Amino acid sequence: MLLQLENIALDLNGKQILHDINFEVQKNEIHSILGANGTGKSTLSAVIMGLNGYRPSRGRVIFDGEDITDFSTSERARRGITLGWQEPAHFEGLTVGEYLKISQRFAGKGFLSPRECLFKVGLVPEKYLVRAVDTTLSGGERKRIELASVLAMKPRLAILDEPDSGIDALSIDHIVDVIKTFSQTGTTVLLITHHEEVAAIADRASLLCDGTILRTGEPHSIAKFFRNHCEECPHVNQPAEEVTSNVRLL
Amino acid sequence: MFDYSKEFEAIARAYEVSGGNPGSLFSKEFASFVVSHHKILFQNSIPGVLISGQETPTGVTAKIIVEPGTIVKNPVHLCYGIIPAEGIQEIVSEFEIGDGARVYFLAHCSFPNAIKVKHVMDAKIHVGKKAEMTYSETHYHGEDGGIEVLPVTKAIVDEGGQLKSEFKLIKGTVGLLRLDYEASLKGKAVCEFDTKVYGKRDDRVFVKESLFLNGENSRGLAKTRVVATDRCISEVISEAVGNAPNARGHVDCVEIVKGRQARASAIPKLLVVDDRAKLTHEAAIGTVDKKQVETLMARGLDENEAVDVVVKGMLR
């Protein structure tokens, strides 16, 4: 087992965002977290990555047998955990090549070159290595570069927060291939998505509902449950992410 | 009496430290103008680029003419500096860029030992029709901070002309900077001001950039990036005036404040006179963006390293 969450709860501004989260991610698996908007998926990724303001109110985060609940984001990254953001930040004056090289400072063995990483995510290296990671990139380009940045780190655990959002439908297959590449090169993937077809590539899936894991199992059965129960569920679009975005501003 | 025979070497060394190539500074292949304190050490004109400088009691005057239609292949090197710890240097310059010409000025200003130095730049720029002028000025200061830098530029850009001006003061201690740049644009003219300053200790940074969009379809951008640390005070005024149909102006200011005693302010001033003009502004002042820092921390950098990467990128 690579990652274990034990009884995780998170309260923000007096509101319970996550509660009673118990689940495990096995080494080398792709594990999907499926859930509707506002059920706490991105918050869960922030808790695992140890982002500021997302320290669990209760429970423990165990990574490869080590309790990392009190570890900073940097310490977690140096142990091999990283996060591909749903809406990645822009960096004025930093080129894509430089951005990818930053990932390699603490990369695992056998990491790919920036050029190879861009190629894997479907971007022409010659065109993108010298471009700035700024707002001149489209949303889709920035998402692909984020994936390349995670690839470049060759992490032990990659948390991919909706890598498929903002990507045109024709490119989804390509993104799916990239996610499989992670797994093939020894990276365990925690894949957060609300697309059933993307979640289906996982070895296992968990359904997040109203801030807790409702069930874990075979991806197709989880996706079927999601389809049949979640669309009309009153828990959808609870203001969880709204609350957490307010916390970011504090 | 300062030994000017050594000044050549000293100014070349300072030029190199500030990022210039001293090999091209004194080459006959390049148009160049090299001033140390009040003394013109070297000036070189090339076909199409005429440089004439004169010494004054407090500095120099310079007239730089780029003849119409001249495409200047190599950068024109301008080097100003004061090597001693004290002194005043006033540079009064006139740039005349002829119609259809294209030229790139690379200016370096070096004050490595300044304790009580005043550097005044008073420039008048005329960019002719469909001409293109790029002016890039980089400062290198010592760590004592005993310097006042007072650059004032008034530019007129004729129809279809382009002026791009970059000012960078990120090495050494700023001291006092009072930058005042202004451009008046005629039809389809384009102007871009880009200022980057890293202030620390007791530095005081005052930046004022004004764009007067007087011609139809003129375009202007005033972009300022300041990092204020320690007890640095920074004040940025970005002004745009839309006086003509379809004129477009944008002012963009980002100031990062690090340290409890540092202060920063941004004042965008937009005035639309012609109702077909459009002006926009954006400003962000405060600490380094949390998401940028966390992204880099998620790649293993510690918080200080992450902030450093963000700041250096912004000032690049």
Image: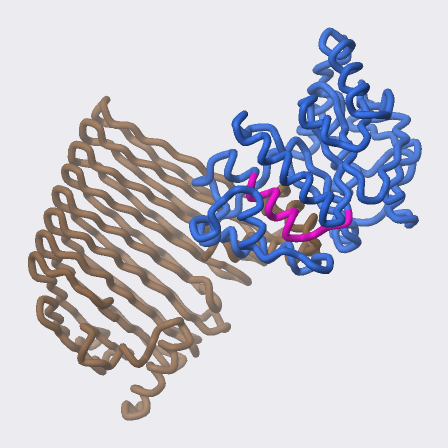
Tell me the quarter of the image containing the C terminus of chain B: bottom left
Depth order, front residue of B96/A115: A115
Work out whether residue B233 can be spotted. Answer: no
Find chain B in the image and tell me its colour: brown
Tell me the quarter of the image containing the N terminus of chain B: bottom left
Q: In which quarter of the view is residue B98 placed?
A: bottom left
The span shown in magenta is A144-156
Depth order, front residue of B255/A93: A93
Instruction: Name the residue at 28% across, 73% down.
Output: B79
Instruction: Name the residue at 31% across, 90% down.
Output: B2
Work out whether residue A64 can be spotted. Answer: yes
Q: In this view, does A122 lie to the left or right of B159?
A: right
Residue B277 point in image, percent of width and height: 25, 27
Residue A249 point in image, percent of width and height: 65, 34
Is residue A151 inside the magenta stretch?
A: yes
Q: In which quarter of the view is residue A164 placed?
A: top right
Find chain A in the image and tell me its colour: blue
Answer above or below: position of A16 versus A175: above
Depth order, front residue of B59/B241: B241
- Magenta-colored segment: predominant secondary structure: helix
Instruction: Name the residue at 16% across, 69% down.
Output: B62
Instruction: Name the residue at 46% across, 67% down.
Output: B171
Answer above or below: position of B52 versus B26: above
Residue A67 point in image, percent of width and height: 91, 47
